[in-house]
Amino acid sequence: MPGGKWNLTASLRPRPGLDGVRAKVLHSATEHVESVGLSLGVDEALIEKLTTDAGVTTAQFAQIWPTRDAFLTDLLCELANQAQIDRADSETLLSTWQYLSMRVDDFHSIEGRRRVLIDVTRSAAEYNFDAVTASSKWRTYAALSVTILSWPEGDARTRVLDALRASELSFVETMESFYRNVLPTIGYRLKPVFKNDYQPFVVAAASVIEGLGIVRTTVPALVEAHFDLPVENGVEAWSVASLAFMGVVDAFIEPDPAFVPEEGIERLSGGIDVTPQSQSD
């Protein structure tokens, strides 16, 4: 991490009224990162560019961040906070709920419910793999998660780790609530050994998608391969991501022997609730 001072004479606390300036500079900086990628260095030329793009002065910058290290730490925390937006796409969650509404006839048999589970898993895994791992915010988050551990111990490292942890927990809670809605609706439940704790399942499923996203950088041909698997009426193309994701699903999830199809159909008409458990308790 760079250790130089931006302005040694400006080591003052940010003055009231500078919140807008701070937001503009951080917005300019996050756009810069999305455009050119994450860099763990900040020099005077970059700060000049960011302040010019934000329409503020370097003097205002120095009132908020007396050192380049202070600015870099704030920027990395901001990047960590923004990453959860692309990782838990609410539009995708709602689309899944709408898709289930078109498959209610399959709810009445074990075979039909299994087919729904497979179809939802396969399509969701492929979409998330393409959409999430192509996101510049996710790529920045992944790079930051790996490189932060090489930073020296100190307040800056702790702050960024705390921001990454908060982002991760927010994502986990959102997805936990989603799975708590969807799985009982289609006649499935978490296996009893997990004691109704969906978070290990969420983390394992996300790790498959995001881990393959990282590996795709070096061996894209392997990660993007598809395989034709036999189905009742022929064959069906499966990606590596969807196969791996299905493996996680089968490890954690099982049919609910007490499932009543009519209750699942009724749940669909009530809409989806993605309020995290910690907020709904």
Image (cartoon, rainbow, N blue to C red):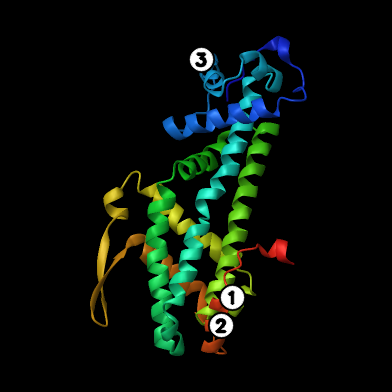
Relative height, residue 269 to residue 35 (above, below): below
User: Secondary structure under badge 1?
Assistant: loop
Viewer-proximal residue, 4 or 281?
A: 281
Which amino acid, by three-letter code, is at mark 1?
A: Gly
Q: Residue furthest left?
A: 234
The residue that mark 1 highlights is 270
Q: Is residue 9 toward the left or the right of residue 241 in the image?
A: right
Residue 103's label in the rendered image is none
Residue reaching furthest top?
9
Q: Which residue lies under the disc numbered 3?
A: 45
Q: Is residue 221 above or below residue 159?
A: below
The mark nearer the N terminus, 2 or 3, is 3
Q: Can residue 6 be seen by looking at this rendering?
A: no
In three-dimensional space, the C-alpha distance between marks 2 and 3, rounded to whole angstroms, equals 60 Å
Residue drawn at x 56%, y 66% as measured from the top left: 178
Residue type at mark 3?
Answer: Ala
Q: What SS does tag 3 mark?
A: helix
Image quarter of the C terminus = bottom right
* Residue 102, horizontal then vertical, whole percent: 42, 77
Are the two marked residues, 2 and 1, in contact with CB atoms closer than 8 angstroms? yes
Residue 95 vs residue 154, the one in the foreground: 95
- Residue nearer the viewer, 24 or 236: 24
